[in-house]
């Protein structure tokens, strides 16, 4: 009997430590994603505008589209940083 009681307390403690539904709450997740999108959108627009400008100047499309991977990578990285509040723990 003592072993079953200790097993129950261990499983209860494990349930309290890990809650798989916690990050999916609309209160914490929605606000951060919106803020991240608003913070990253101007930089993404500037980068895509540069690509359009280069294409308009008559540069070969291959060279203009070589700028897209770094622009998209930096935008996605910034979105992840802003949406997860990574920077709040650093200050």
Image: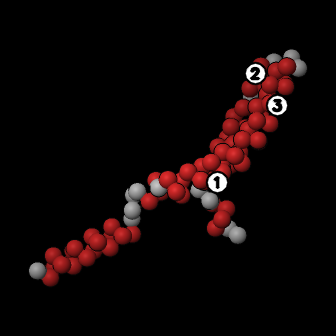
Residue 50 at x, y percent in the picture: 82, 31
* N-term mark: 1 or 2: 2
* N-term mark: 1 or 3: 3
Residue 24 at x, y percent in the picture: 46, 53
Above or below for 42 versus 36? above
What residue sits 55% from the left and 51% below the top? 30
Way the structure is coloured: secondary structure
Q: Which mark is residue 68?
A: none
Q: Would you call the spot at circle 2 few (<14 residues within 10 Å), some (14-19), or many (20 or more)?
A: few
What residue sits 72% from the left and 32% below the top? 68
Instruction: Mark yes or no: residue 70 visible.
Output: no
Q: Which residue is mark 2?
A: 62
What residue sits 27% from the left and 70% below the top? 11
Residue 2 at x, y percent in the picture: 15, 82
Q: Secondary structure at mark 1?
A: helix
* N-term mark: 3 or 2: 3
Q: Secondary structure at mark 3?
A: helix
Quadrant the C terminus occupies:
bottom right
Q: Which residue is mark 1?
A: 81
Question: Which marked residue is nearer to the observer: mark 3 or mark 2?
Answer: 3
Left or right side of 24 for 5: left
User: For residue 21, which quarter of the picture?
Assistant: bottom left
Q: Which mark is residue 50?
A: 3
Q: How far apart are the two marked residues, 3 and 2, measured between alpha carbons? A: 14 Å
């Amino acid at each position: 009997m003592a072993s079953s009681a200790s097993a129950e307390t261990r499983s209860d403690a494990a349930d309290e430590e890990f809650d798989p539904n916690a990050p999916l709450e609309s209160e914490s997740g929605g606000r951060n994603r919106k803020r991240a999108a608003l913070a990253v959108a101007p930089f993404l627009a500037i980068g895509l505008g540069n690509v359009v400008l280069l294409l308009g100047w008559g540069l070969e499309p291959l060279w203009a589209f070589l700028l897209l991977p770094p622009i998209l990578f930096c935008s996605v990285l910034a979105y992840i940083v802003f949406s997860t509040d990574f920077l709040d723990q650093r200050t």
